[in-house]
Amino acid sequence: MLPEMTEEPRRSRSTEAFFGRRRGKTIRPQQAVALEEGTRLYGLDLREPAPQDLRSLFDAEVADVRLEIGFGGGEHLVHEASRHPGTGFIGVEPFVNSMAKMTMVLGETPMANLRLYDDDATRLLDWLPEGSLAGVDLFYPDPWPKKKHWKRRFVNEVNLSRFARVIRRGGIFRFASDIDTYVNWTLLHCARHGAFAWQACEASDWHTPYAGWPGTRYEAKAIRENRSPAYLTFVRT
Ligand SMILES: C[S@@+](CC[C@H](N)C(=O)[O-])C[C@H]1O[C@@H](n2cnc3c(N)ncnc32)[C@H](O)[C@@H]1O
């Protein structure tokens, strides 16, 4: 298991920006084995300082490093890491069942350009060296549609400043959501923040999925329920 999972009581894990469930259905024995082995091989230990050159975290020779926050079923992360073997990917997911699923996949198909972190992404962001990422992906973050819960949304001024610190100039922040108030919220927060320029020339741009987009389980459900996805891309200025 990840060192942080074994040595600290679960309630001491950070919840600055994580308000969801940590666990769902009981983990099957086979999944538990995959989780232990997978987190030993792929898990990041934040008690160690981050290497100044983040590329050294990977067994593969990588030119750049990208981060996906809240990878859920891992559809996009696995797809993208397979498509770009020369890029290192860090996937963050605090929901144990999703991490178990991911480590089962990695048991079948090891990936030398992937590392994982199993807690609140804000902790990882604060650990990363300045300007160390080529991009951050935040796809279908927990929507918190009720106004009284908007303050729980991952996109906020503090987290945008975290992104601005770790994404190098010219790097990319991508955000997809099916919740129109969250899409507007993100456009507004990025415009106000000032470190991110939205890359859209016309309205059709933000309804067009990203190049090579595989879809995610969450997105498929949104589409079945007649909610339209928006795909935003911002450049770190
Ligand atoms: C609605 S799901 C979307 C999952 C996936 N991106 C997709 O499109 O299918 C949101 C995910 O974000 C994760 N999450 C929520 N807060 C987080 C945080 N602070 N750090 C990292 N992941 C987080 C949740 O555990 C959940 O898996």
Image (spheres, grey):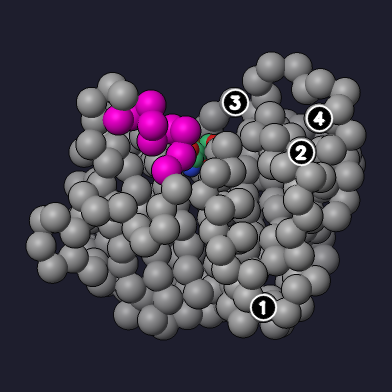
Q: Looking at the picture, does residue 176 appear above or below residue 114?
A: above
Residue bearing mark 4:
31
| Residue at the spot 63% in from the left edge and 75% down from the top edge | 86
Mark 4 near mark 2, Cβ–Cβ under 8 Å?
yes
Circle number at residue 45 = none
Which residue is disc 1 drawn over? 62
**Chain-order first, disc 2 or disc 1:** 1
* Residue labelled 3 has its Cβ within 8 Å of some atom of ligand 1: yes
Q: Is residue 217 visible?
A: yes
Residue hosting label 2: 104
Question: Residue 9: x, y in percent?
Answer: 82, 33
Work out whether mark 4 precedes mark 2 in sequence or the reverse, and give the earlier one: 4
- Give the foreground label among 3 and 1: 1
Q: Which residue is mark 3?
A: 21
Gap in Å between the C-alphas at discs 2 and 1?
24 Å
The residue tagged with tag 3: helix, strand or loop? Answer: loop
* Magenta-drawn segment: 215-223
Q: Quadrant of residue 194?
A: bottom left
Q: Disc 1 to disc 4, how far (Cα)?
A: 29 Å
Residue 185 appears at what percent x and percent y? 24, 47
Q: Secondary structure at mark 4?
A: helix
